Image (cartoon, rainbow, N blue to C red):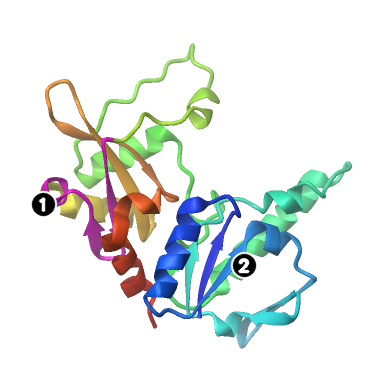
Amino acid sequence: MILVLCDETDVAALWAADALRRRGLSLRLLTGRELAGVRGWRHTIGAAGVETTLRLDGHDLRGDQVHGVLNRLAFLPQAWLATIGGADRDYAVQEMVAFYLSWLHALAGPKLNPPTPQGLCGNLRHPSAWIALGVRAGLPVRRFRQTSEDDPATYWQKPSDPAAATVFVVGDAVIGPAALVAIHRGACLRLSNLAECPLLGINFAPDIGGTWRMIAASVTPDLMRGGEALTDALAAALAP
């Protein structure tokens, strides 16, 4: 069974789940709201490995039933966070983050994407960090500028500029506009490897001179922009 984890408002993930079902994959969609309402967890770590069981309404979901994960859950479910308050809230949140990291890490099969302490579905890097990685990977990038006069929080909060094109990396597959893929396939794969994100969306836009440059990257890209070719790549990467 393939497990798809996402926020209930993640339209791109819901679209991908439906497309994967149409390709014949056995799939279980689990939203953040459903995770927040889990009736109980059993998480055992021992010499034999990690065993996890979620008690859902009407049935249990065991870790050994999962053979691949499309993981779009960047944060703890908002529906769960809304129920936590009091002086120990921060402590409770950090404990739950550690629990989710252990659970997601232990799930078998390919993970698109594996959890990290900087984000449950991959490292949620600062825009400047993505640009720096892009340079290391060999991509032409748009220059990033931030000064001591800027509010450090601004670049975390503001949305990136619209992408004229997105190139997707799914494992060893690179999907996107043919001209960009032909030129930058190797560099896009290197960026995915450097970021340790098997599923990555890399946004490009032309500069004033017409050169296409990387302007941003995301571990939760808009999968619908990749169309059927992207869904085929997801199915190939996740299929047992």
Range of magenta residues: 164-182
Q: How many neighbours does mark 2 have within 10 angstroms: few (below 14), some (14-19), or many (20 or more)?
A: some
Query: Does residue 110 appear in the picture of this structure?
Result: no
Quarter of the image where one finds residue 216: top left
Q: Which residue is mark 1?
A: 182
Quarter of the image where one finds residue 28: bottom right
Asked if the magenta segment contains residue 180, the reply would be: yes
Image location (x, y in percent) of residue 54: 71, 75
97 left or right of 11? right
Q: Nearer the viewer, residue 104 or 177?
A: 177
Residue at left 24%, top 63%? 173
Residue at left 85%, top 46%? 88
Single out the mark in the foreground, 2 or 1.
1
Q: Earlier in the sequence, mark 2 or mark 1?
A: 2
Q: Which residue is mark 2?
A: 102
Image location (x, y in percent) of residue 48: 61, 88
Q: Secondary structure at mark 1?
A: helix
Query: Does residue 100 appear in the picture of this structure?
Result: yes
Q: Look at the picture and state if 108 lies above or below 146.
A: below
Q: Look at the picture and state if 131 lies above or below 50.
A: above
Q: Look at the picture and state if 1 lies above or below 32.
A: below
Asked if the magenta segment contains residue 153, the reply would be: no
Image location (x, y in percent) of residue 41: 75, 73
